[in-house]
Structure formats: structure tokens, C-alpha cells
Image: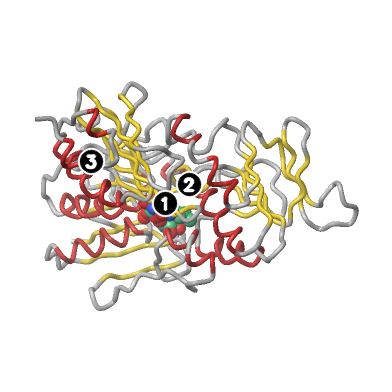
Amino acid sequence: MRIVVVGAGMAGVQTAVALRERGYDGEVLLLGAEPHQPYDRPPLSKDVLLGKAEHSRFDIDFAGQGIELRLGSRAAGLDAEARLLRTDAGELAYDRLVLATGASPVTLPGQSARTHLLRTHDDAVALKGALRPGARIVVVGAGWIGAEAATVARQLGCEVTVVEAAPVPLAGALPAGVGEAMRGWYAEAGVDLRTSAAVGGIVDGDVRLEGDPGATVLLTDGTELGADAVVVGVGARPDTGWLDGSGIVLDDRGAVAADDRLRASADGVLAVGDCASFPSARYGTRLMVHHWDNAVQGARAAAANALGADQAYDPVPYFWSQQFGRMVQYAGHHGPDDELLHRGDPADRSWGAIWLRDGAPVALLAVDRPRDLAQGRRLLERGTPLDPALAADPSVQLKAAVRS
Ligand SMILES: Cc1cc2nc3c(=O)[nH]c(=O)nc-3n(C[C@H](O)[C@H](O)[C@H](O)COP(=O)(O)OP(=O)(O)OC[C@H]3O[C@@H](n4cnc5c(N)ncnc54)[C@H](O)[C@@H]3O)c2cc1C
């Protein structure tokens, strides 16, 4: 039997490793489009960008585990009926195929040569070269990546402006009231945050300074921001374009529409990580989760199911972000109709938020409150109802806020 895994990021690598952990002794081929040894992405916007680490390669002996790594090899098409994968180096037959091609950053039209994305090791190295003390850095997008890039740029002594089209930071992920509480973090770090500021274009050269080789970020209200480098962090889309014409069903966001066992619409094909979505019975909706933990946990389920198990995948999603000297952690999934409880005062160093549905927690945000996260995650997994007054009191441990 031959199992081919496409994409050598966290989800693909963990799937390959989990196949071996489960005792599978057939062929495992791991295809990665990038030329580099497989690596982890979260450090790219943290220690690698800061210069504390040179790389974030996984410490895995692929050959020793009998995993055949084909780097610099891109899948270009799929004949699911014939179980044939088309790659830039020819066709590959498979018995099981695991799609783990991740996501690509959204780009803005008319980007100048001074524009950087932050998704790959090469992106991080290129951006690091631009983060010199005193450099004018404009970050487009006050999301997770934008906030982390701004944090590091300030630590390296750059002048940083963040422009965000929405009225508050993290508008795509958190309610306005919660995102608003993070505005002060930018000011405190010396970052000029401009919200409700949409970018109309980015052009080469600072149009205000003749002969300046930098770039200009043009806002739709007519403002021109000169920059030595521009970082665009406005989201990522599943890397699934290569599946066009394969018959693999995608959802409306372009993710492989997997089932609750991470099986794609063709026999023998599974999908995991940033490139996939799956129906969650826990939250009553289809989830596309672009976070590290989903790539790790999903891989275990994908590997098991590729080997014939019948394992449902319905996690409590989790992620963390390190920004402006804070550890921000979120677990679960909330919707607009869930009841939001604030836990503590955002003016304080540590605070949080909890979302309840029918009295039970469905999501939790913890800012510098790791104990809340640890206890809350267990409560989320069990759906244990909470006493709202106790849960909103930051001096009460979450495990003690259980409704009696
Ligand atoms: C800078 C950065 C910081 C992050 N920080 C955090 C964090 O702090 N916390 C957190 O929870 N999450 C974080 N994330 C998100 C997390 O890293 C991702 O969710 C995770 O990497 C997803 O893993 P994946 O394997 O699904 O996709 P990817 O890591 O994107 O890997 C997919 C791989 O597939 C390859 N590929 C694509 N198309 C093809 C093809 N056709 N053929 C062959 N190979 C292909 C790609 O080159 C890529 O290497 C961060 C992401 C980035 C970019």
C-alpha cells in the first residue's frame, strides 16, 4: 500500500509520522512544494523574525522513519477515479491520498517590490532583512499576523504604522468590544494604529520624497504613508487551486469540504489542516481552522482514518498569539448569538472573555491567564454549565465557576 501526503507543513508531517506511530509499514511519500526541510510556522513571526532563531525546522528523522520526503515537488492535479496524482515530476499512483497543502496569504493588488508577506521561511528571512532600526514599516492588517509582525518590528527599533480597514483590531475573529480592548496595546508599544483605514494601493517609491526608493501605501481617504517596507497580513486562503477539475468538493471558502472523519469527496482521499474544513457537531457548523493545534490534532485523526479507523474529528479549536508582550490564547468557537461575559478589566494586565451558549461555555479568550485557558479548555470539552456571575469574576478560578 502507498499513502501519499501532499504538503510538508505541520499537518502533512504529523500525518506521516502518525501513520508510522500507528504501526503502518507500507510506503509513505511526503511531497512538499518548498525546497526547505519541513519547518514550523509560528516561530516565523516570533523568534525567527526577531533573530533569536535561524530556522524552525522540525527535528524529525524522516529517512529513519521510512518516510520518503520529496521536497521542491508540487502536486499539480488529481485523477481521483484512477487514484493518480499529477506532480511537476510526473504521475504518482496512490492507495490513500492525504491533502495537506495549507493556505496562501491573500495579496493586495498593485504591490510594490517593498511589499512582504509572512507565510514561509523565505518570507521571514526577507522581512527580517528590512526590519532595521529606524526603518519605516507599514503593516497592513491588525489581525494575528499583523500584530505579531508589528510587535517584532518595534522590538527591532522600527517606526511602525498599522493600517486596518475595520474599526477595531482583530475584527474578523473577535467582537468589536473585545478587539477594542487591544487598541491600547499598540499605543503602549509605540505603534501608530490607524483603524477604518482601507488601503487603495501600494506603489514603488515614497511619492512624497523625490528619489526615495521606498514605497507608498495609498489609503482610500487620500492619505499617503511612506514606507521602507510594507507587510501585508490580511488573511490566508486554502491552497486548493491545483484541485480544479479533480471533482474534489470545495466549500465556499475554497477549503476541501471534508466530512467529520476528514474524508474528502473522493474514495481514499482525506484532507487536514489549513486546506480543509469539516462539520463540527459540537458547534453545529462547518469549521475551517487556520491554527497550529488543528494541524496537529487533525493529522492524528486523518492518519487513523486513512488506515481504516472510524475516528470522528470534532475538536475544541485552540490557538495562541504572542503580541505586545502578552500571551493571547483562545479556545473553542463562538458565534454572534452567544452570550459574551467579560472576565476582568482589559485595562488590567490580564483579562479574558467567555462565550456561553445555553449556559455552557463554547469559547474562551485568555490574555496572560494561562490557568484560565487550561481549566477553561476542559470545561469547553465537557460543555460544563457555568455560573455567569462567578465566571465573570477574575478572582474566582474557572473550575470553581461551575454551576451547582
Ligand atoms: C507566520 C505565521 C505564524 C503563525 N503563528 C501561529 C500561532 O502563534 N499560533 C497558532 O495557533 N497558529 C499560528 N499559525 C498558523 C499555523 O502555523 C498554521 O495553521 C499551520 O502551519 C497549518 O499547517 P498546514 O500543514 O495545514 O499548512 P502549511 O503550514 O501551510 O503547510 C502546507 C505546505 O504545503 C505545501 N504545498 C502547498 N501546495 C502544494 C502542492 N500543490 N504540492 C505540494 N506541496 C504544496 C506548502 O508549500 C506548505 O509547505 C501561524 C502561521 C504563520 C504563517
In the rendered structure, the answer to whether residue 178 lies left or right of residue 317 reads: right
Residue named by callout 2: 144
Q: Does 295 sit left or right of 301 as displayed?
A: right
- Mark 2 falls on what kind of element? helix
In the image, residue 171 lies at what x, y percent? 49, 33
Which sits in the foreground, 40 or 100?
Answer: 40
Q: Which label is found at residue 321? A: 1
In the picture, measured across the screen, residue 151 lies left or right of residue 297, that is right
Q: Amino acid at mark 1?
A: Ser
Eyeballing the image, is 324 above or below 44? above
Q: Earlier in the sequence, mark 3 or mark 2?
A: 2
Residue 73 in the image: x percent, y percent? Answer: 44, 63
Q: Could you tell me which quadrant the C terminus lies in?
A: top left
Q: Tag on residue 396?
A: 3
Colour logic: secondary structure
Q: Residue at coordinates 65% horizontally, 45% vertically from top-left? A: 192
Left or right position of 46 against 372:
right
Nearer-the-camera pick, 181 or 265: 181
Mark in front: 3 vs 2:
3
Residue at the spot 66% in from the left edge and 59% down from the top edge: 158
* Residues tagged 1 and 2 counted as in contact (Cβ below 8 A): yes
Q: Secondary structure at mark 1?
A: strand
Earlier-in-chain disc, 1 versus 3: 1
Q: Nearer the viewer, mark 1 or mark 3?
A: 3
In this rendering, does residue 392 appear at all? yes
Between the C-alphas of marks 1 and 2, the distance is 7 Å
- The percent position of residue 338, horizontal first and vertical second, equals 31, 24
Which quarter of the figure is the N terminus placed in? bottom left
Q: Residues within 10 Å of mark 3 (few under 14, many from 20)?
A: some
Query: In the image as oriented, which residue stretches furthest toward the front?
Result: 395
Q: Is mark 1 within 8 Å of ligand 1?
A: yes
Q: Position of residue 117 (x, y in %)?
A: 58, 53
